[in-house]
Image (cartoon, rainbow, N blue to C red):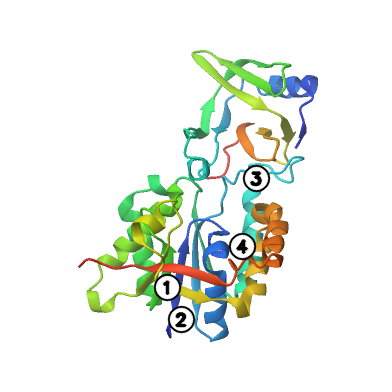
Amino acid sequence: MTLQPQRQILVVFPHPDDEAFSSAGTIRLYRNMGVPVTYACLTLGEMGRNLGNPPFATRESLPEIRREELKAACKHMGIEDLRMMGLRDKTVEFEDDEKMVNLVKDLIDELNPSLIITFLPGYAVHPDHEATGRAVVEAVRRMPKEDRPTLYTVGFANNTVAEKGEPNIEIDITSVKTDKVKTLQAHASQTAWMIEDYQKRIDEGDNWLDKERFYLFNFED
Amino acid sequence: MKEVQIDELQELLNSFANKDVYIHLETTNGAYATHFDEKVFNAGAFIRNAKIRYELAKIIEDTPHRVGLKMEHGWVYAQGITHYEVDEKGRLLMAGLDFTGKLAVALEISETPFSY
């Protein structure tokens, strides 16, 4: 499908690299069109498990490594407005729910986005993903219908397609595939061991990097 | 971090005994464990910046190692420790890294609080 015109995009994910897997190509396409994109990244992925063996990081040094990776990833996507929100990995769901909704509301009030990209509650697998998606959906649900931005949501739980059908938004990112791969590579602490696999999959004609897919969130009321 | 050297690590553990210290203790098999294999029962525990004081610390020779701290009214222990270092802030960071380099357990001891 062709890209819908947008005024301002807000991307809300909890971990550096969530955006790389799900939406780096879409973000790059919009940036190439001059659409401003703000990325609110809630944590620094402090609890990432991959430290290597022999280790390249400690539990305490990992956040700074991932902060730099996130900044580099944003360069590849063309994101100029990166907000690191200072929450801690794996604790997002335990934060006060109202605080989370207000965190999103404040971003919406400031930026007036026409599109928000986040996770699809119920189908986002990681507790932080679920909590992030819930907060965004609730913040938007509270807005007057006519003011609500469009929501593109990412769902990848094993039961997603069975219950929700195929994603209804499919964006062809073949023209920015290289930027997507560079964004993934920028998160080396998380992706280094997968990079060979990516290249192999591309060489074998796998088209998983040709498209990004989202569920257009449908508010019942 | 380097692989555990028992004598050196035992001395480091001793150096924090009988002092008020902050600990980080974590066990995990990853948030995606059940996503990748529905037969996995996903469990873990996490505590950060609990202030404790221990009178005795012991590391056991079996690999991966077990580390136990005896307190006046209780215990702290971690199983599966493979690596450690003293970082630039003088904190003793111990971790258990599995065969693919993923952290499975961490026990860290510091005289000053860890970051958030």
- In front of the other: label 4 or label 1? 1
Q: Provide the secondary structure element on which disc 3 rests.
A: loop
Q: Is residue B80 visible?
A: yes
Q: Chain of mark 4?
A: A
Q: Chain of mark 1?
A: A
First reached walking from the N terminus: tag 4 or tag 1 = 4
Q: Who's the residue at 57% across and 37% down the image?
A: B113
- Give the Cα distance between marks 4 and 3: 16 Å
Check the image and report above or below for A201 versus A50.
below
Tag shown at residue A70: 4
Check the image and report above or below for A182 versus A90.
below
Determine whether, in the image, residue A167 is placed left or right of residue B63: left
- Give the Cα distance between marks 2 and 1: 8 Å
Q: Which residue is mark 3?
A: A50
- Give the Cα distance between marks 2 and 3: 37 Å
Q: The disc labelled 3 sits on which kind of residue?
A: Asn
- Give the Cα distance between marks 1 and 3: 32 Å
Q: Chain of mark 3?
A: A
- Give the Cα distance between marks 4 and 1: 26 Å
Tag shown at residue A99: none
Image coordinates for residue A161, horizontal then vertical, percent: 40, 58
